[in-house]
Image: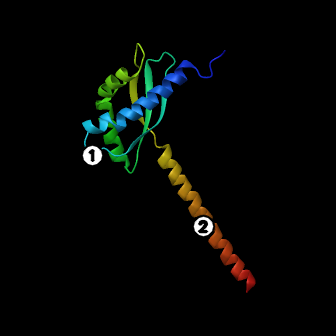
Amino acid sequence: MAREFSRTDRVSQQVHKEIASILQNEYKHKVADLPFITVSGVEVSRDLAHAKVYVTFYGQDDAQTKELMKQLDEHKGFIRSILAKKLRMRAVPAVHFHSDSSLSEGLRISSLVSQTIAEDDKKRNESNESNEE
């Protein structure tokens, strides 16, 4: 029977789950004043040597996000050591953190669409009122 997912997909899901748990539990105790972090995705290379971890910080501007990304990069050895204890693998992938701005960009685009719809409705109502007169 064929497997539904490739090994890289299964490892990616496991790394995603474990890193999210590590950031939520162990890492928050090590670093003070840490905002809410979400692991939005993980891509593992085909040779399982590297893992790109995409994280989102809620309620932070660009300067704060860069500072938090710098903190994550400084502590990636600590995070990888905990990950090694949790995964049942011979070689644990090297962790590379990347900022994921897709959520904030999606919210910005959504607000622009809502604003445009509201302006169109306002113009339509004004034109209907002028036509009735």
- Where's residue 99, x and y in %? 42, 38
Residue 4 falls in which quadrant of the image?
top right
Residue lying at 41% horizontally and 21% vertically, measured from the top left: 87
Quadrant into which the N terminus falls:
top right
| Disc 2 element | helix
Q: Residue furthest bottom?
A: 133
Left or right, residue 126 beside residue 47: right
Above or below, comparing residue 43 to residue 109 in the picture: above
Marks 1 and 2 in Cβ contact (< 8 Å): no
Report which residue position mark 2 lands on: 118
Q: Which is nearer the N-term, disc 1 or disc 2? A: 1
Q: Is residue 1 above or below residue 58?
A: above
Q: Quadrant of residue 85?
A: top left
Image: 12 above or below 27: above
Question: Mark 1: which amino acid?
Answer: Asp
Q: Position of residue 131 (x, y in %)?
A: 74, 81
Please tell me which residue is depicted at 32% across the width and 31% down the height of the picture. Answer: 73
Nearest to the observer: residue 108 or residue 29: 29
- 20 vs 105, left or right, is left
Nearest the eye: 109 or 92? 92
Residue at point 65% right, 69% down?
121
Distance from disc 1 to disc 2, alpha carbons, whole Å, reads 38 Å
Q: Which of the 4 image quadrants contains residue 29? A: top left
Q: Residues within 10 Å of mark 1 (few under 14, many from 20)?
A: few
Q: Amino acid at mark 2?
A: Ala
SS state under label 1: loop
Tag 1 residue:
33
> Nearest the camera: 131 or 43?
43
